[in-house]
Image (spheres, rainbow, N blue to C red):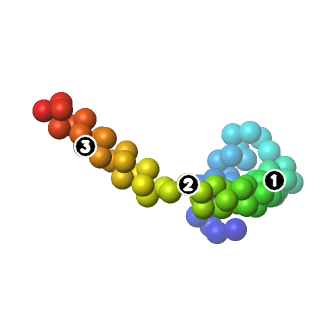
Amino acid sequence: MFPFLRAVYYIPIQQAFGYDNIQMGVLTSGLGGLSLLAYFPGAGLLISFNAMAWHLRLKSRVHAGQDQAR
């Protein structure tokens, strides 16, 4: 594990919840497994969802709202 991740995430979560290293290992393994399983439906959703078009549409609405406020 990278030292940065250990200092920022691992140790504070371990101290906050009172977990030992085995419990943290199970937690991070579960998170990794969940991430792996979510990758496949997420890729299919990404293919069917044009994120750039939504981003530009939302951006234009935000700018239009700022122009009306002036």
Kindly identify which residue carries mark 1: 30
**Which is more N-terminal, label 1 or label 2?**
1
Q: Contact, CB < 8 Å: mark 3 with mark 2? A: no
Identify the residue position indicated by label 2 in the image: 49
Q: Of 32 and 37, which appears nearest the observer? A: 37
Q: What distance separates the C-alpha of mark 3 from that of mark 1?
A: 41 Å
Return the x and y of residue 62 as percentages of the image width and height: 30, 41
Tell me if I can see residue 56 in this picture.
yes
How crowded pointer 1 is (Cα within 10 Å; few <14, some 14-19, many 20+) is rated as: few
Q: Nearer the viewer, mark 3 or mark 1?
A: 3
Closest to the observer, 33 or 68? 68
Q: CA distance from mark 3 to mark 2?
A: 23 Å
Say what amino acid the circle numbered 3 marks.
Answer: His
Please give the name of the residue rendered at 13% of the width and 32% of the height, measured from the top-left corner: 70
Q: Which mark is residue 16?
A: none
Q: Is residue 69 placed above or below 56 in the rendered structure?
A: above
Q: Is residue 4 above or below residue 18?
A: below
Q: Earlier in the sequence, mark 3 or mark 2?
A: 2
- What amino acid is found at the position of numbered circle 2 in the picture? Phe
The furthest residue to the front: 48
Label 1: element kind = helix
Residue 1 spot, x, y in % from top left: 70, 68
**Amino acid at dot 1:** Gly
47 relative to 39 in the view: left or right: left
Q: Are marks 2 and 1 in contact (CB under 8 Å)?
A: no
Residue 2 percent coordinates (x, y): 64, 69
Q: Is residue 70 left or right of residue 5?
A: left
Q: Is residue 1 left or right of residue 26?
A: left
- The residue that label 3 is drawn on is 63
Question: Residue 19, located in which quarter of the rendered image?
Answer: top right
